[in-house]
Image: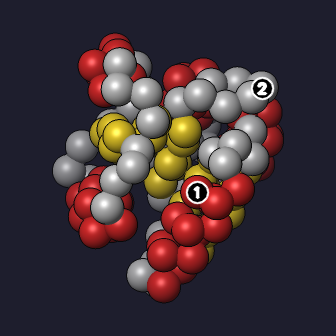
Amino acid sequence: MAKILIADDEPDVLLILSERLRRSGHEVEYAPDGNQAIQKSEQTAYNLLILDIRMPGHTGYEVCEFAKSSGKNGKTPVLLISAFPVESVVWRQSKADAFLAKPFEIGQLITTVDWLLQGNT
């Protein structure tokens, strides 16, 4: 069981992802914006961060940068998600470990999460 933080400003996305990951046996926390994602990553060590790129407060890129430079989550894999196609190219310039374009299949999410949790970044 992994401890996962999901940050996304779309409540439906948070609900769907958190429920599916919980059914897969993971402990899930969520943040509705980048500010809360940074606060949570300051307080808690996670096994995986799933971050929407475009959200209020701080972007997923900024949250990723912060987490990767912190003591608690410096080695934590980061999965960026976005509904904007251009992000599929731009994310490679970040410190993130993987990217999924919305909408994605839940099976694709689970496969990517499992891969990241196994340390195959």
Q: Is residue 91 above or below residue 100?
A: above
Q: Residue furthest left?
A: 120
Contact (Cβ within 8 Å) of mark 1 with mark 2: no
Q: Is residue 41 shown left or right of residue 26?
A: right
- Looking at the rendered structure, the number of numbered marks drawn on it comes to 2
Residue placed at 43% from the left, 27% from the top?
Answer: 84
The residue beneath circle 2 is 57
Image coords of residue 76 (percent x, y): 46, 45
Q: Is residue 39 above or below residue 68?
A: below
Image coords of residue 16 (percent x, y): 56, 68
Task: Give the amino acid type for the residue marked by disc 1 in the picture.
Answer: Val
Frontmost of labels 1 and 2 is 1
Q: Which numbered tag is attached to residue 13?
A: 1
Q: Is residue 21 shown left or right of residue 112?
A: right
Image coords of residue 35 (percent x, y): 79, 33
In front here: 98 or 103? 103
Residue placed at 46% from the left, 36% from the top?
Answer: 82
